[in-house]
Amino acid sequence: MHIILYEEKNFQGRSYECGSDCSNLNSYIRRCNSAQVIKGCWMIYERTNYKGCQYFLKRGEYPNFQNWMGFNDFIRSCLAIPQYKGSYRLRLYERNNFGGKTLEAMEDCPSVSECFNHHDIQSCNVFDGYWIFYELPYYKGHQYFLRPGEYRRFSDWGALNARVGSIKQITEFS
């Protein structure tokens, strides 16, 4: 795992190289306008302790924050996503605490409303694999990282509302 975060666009200015999770980047960089992912997959967060808006970065170059669908240059923590080579499976629920109508998924879904006839997902159980939820269909809008576990309400995965537009497996761990 290896990521380099830069204060300025186009990989300029002060930088910080990171090889593992960092819950507080404040003492290393003031802002983040570009990034290079050398190895692995990462979630970067707008607030310390892995809170706030989340952005998924895979191996590659991001010359400005808009390239990772960022809303601003505030990045205060980063999380290395462990490599995973296995099956993927999760179950979505229309109500809190695993209630109501369910949808089980084992692959990407570009439009939850088309698959599920519902876009409000109140809870989720991730059985296998690492996933990204997107607020809008076709992998757009706010992003949320989910690892195996129980999410009894949408706030458990960091969302402010229950809208899930699309879901995607994290399969690229180069």
Image (spheres, rainbow, N blue to C red):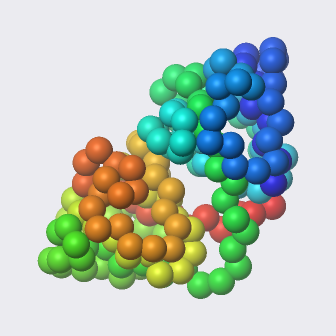
Q: Position of residue 13 (x, y in %)?
A: 81, 15
Between residues 111 and 10, which one lies in front from this camera angle?
10
Query: Relative to 22, is 30 above or below?
Result: above
Q: Is residue 138 visible?
A: no
Note whether 78 is above or below 91 in the view shown.
above
Looking at the image, which residue is at 24% across and 76% down?
98
Quadrant of the image occupied by residue 113: bottom left
Is residue 142 placed above or below 156 in the rendered structure? above
Identify the image quadrant of residue 133.
bottom left
**Picture quarter containing residue 119?**
bottom left
Q: Where does the image place residue 79, in percent across and percent down from the top left?
A: 64, 50
Q: Residue at 64%, 20% (x, y): give it.
A: 31
Q: Position of residue 62 (x, y in %)?
A: 71, 34
Which residue is depicted at the point 44% across and 63% down? 167
- Residue 29: give x, y in percent of width and height: 71, 22
Q: Quadrant of the C terminus?
A: bottom right
| Quadrant of the drawing holding the N terminus | bottom right
User: Which residue shows up at 62% across the image and 42% down it?
Assistant: 23
